[in-house]
Amino acid sequence: MRRILTIAILGLLLIHCKQENRTGYVINGNAKEVYNGVRVYLKSVDNQGRQIVNDTAIVINGAFKMNGTIDEPSVRFLAVDGAQGELIFMLENSDITIDIDKTVLMKSKVTGSETNNDFRTFQDEMERMAEANKDLIIHYRTAINNKELRKKDSIRTILEKYSEQISGYPLKYLNENNDTYFSLNLLGLEINNPKIDLKAYMEAFNNLTPRLKETPKGKEISAKLDELYKEYQKIAHLEVGKLAPNFEAPTPDGKMVSLDDLKGKVTIIDFWAAWCGPCRKENPNVVRIYNKFHDQGLEIIGVSLDGNRRQNDPKKSWLDAIEKDNLVWTQVSNLQYFNDPVARLYNISSIPATFILDKDGKIAYKNLRGKALELKVQELLQQ
């Protein structure tokens, strides 16, 4: 009897040790709706954001299998020939079952990955917020079609709040879940967004538990954040709330004008060019805003990035566009395209681009267009 108990205990210990020291994963795929011979792909994303294929399998009798090892739980993509989209999930070293939904791959069911459960919690909340937005979008479009301007503006204000809530949820999730591998991967994905609040995400990374920061992925993200911060320091002077850097540039008649000449007034710095289609399309809106608010203290200084090699006569193109679009406010340009000193000072890489300054010359808003630009100008003038 004692021998039987000893063998049983040893067996349990061996099983326990095997589970604790697991070094690989097995993906068991159920693909009943997929034809025999169809290929399935397991993919990841490299440091340049490009997808690479890590493994492939063939569907046989409604099933497929993949196995391998992974250093730490990470985001993976599953694609099936002939099916639209991809399944995004968290892969870890465990027995994972994937029930394929051929119609909508993203709705395929993944079980056996604890990290993926965290991902699903995050994704479900994102989908809930998006769903809550749907009815508002329908009402917004109806208001536009019926030309109900007040209703449209009211709904848009609500939509903007929803949009901020959705775009801010990843950071909120990170701050509330600082000890999951999904959070580490989410942070790794978010820092590739050029519009992120870098300081907030650096703080979120610092808030992660030491075990996560010491992983290979954690060290990789730390290095990337350091790199981004070095780049950020080069343009930190352009943050909202900072005093707009002064500049001096020539008007069409060669007179030098500086930004400081407009001190004490709400000012729009408008980067544009005669060759820029979106700029020319936005110009009527800027003209309307100028005509509406100039008497209340609004000033605009247009900075042209004409000087494109394809322009036979950049200055003539610039002057013709000013006249045709009725741009009656101050216009300056060095006619040096994106090498314009003012454009470089303001880190301009695409146009149209705008900086909206308050009466103290501080940057209040950036890159507003359409109705949003009008509303913010009105707000600043009333302060």
Image (spheres, helix red, strand yellow):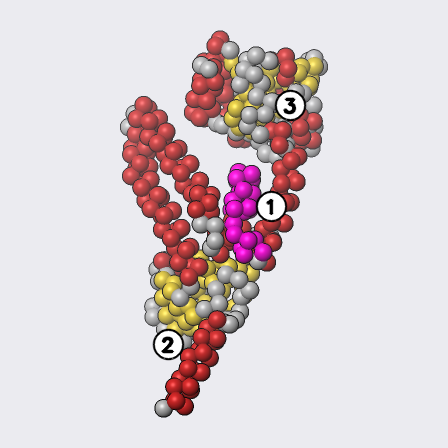
Q: How many marks?
A: 3
**What element does badge 3 sit on?**
loop
Query: Can you give x and y, in whole percent of width and height, for residue 249 in the image?
Result: 68, 19
Q: State the residue at coordinates (42%, 79%).
A: 12
Q: Which residue is mark 3?
A: 245
**Disc 3 versus disc 2: nearer the observer:** 3
Q: Which residue is mark 1?
A: 225
Is-magenta flag for residue 192?
yes
Q: Is residue 70 above or below residue 370?
A: below
Marked residue nearer the N-terminal end (1 or 2)? 2
Query: Can you give x and y, in whole percent of width and height, for residue 130 in the image?
Result: 35, 43
Q: Amino acid at mark 2?
A: Asn
Query: Can you give x and y, in whole percent of width and height, for residue 129 in the image?
Result: 35, 43
Q: Is residue 215 above or below residue 17?
A: above
Q: Does residue 185 appear anywhere in the picture?
A: yes
Q: Amino acid at mark 1?
A: Leu
Q: Is residue 383 above or below residue 226?
A: above
Q: Amino acid at mark 3?
A: Pro
Q: Which residue is mark 2?
A: 61
Query: Can you give x and y, in whole percent of width and height, for residue 286 in the image?
Result: 50, 21
Front-most of 207 and 166? 207
Q: State the residue at coordinates (52%, 24%).
A: 364
**What element does badge 2 sit on?**
loop
**What element does badge 1 sit on?**
helix
Segment colored magenta: 190-214
Front-most of 22 and 58? 22
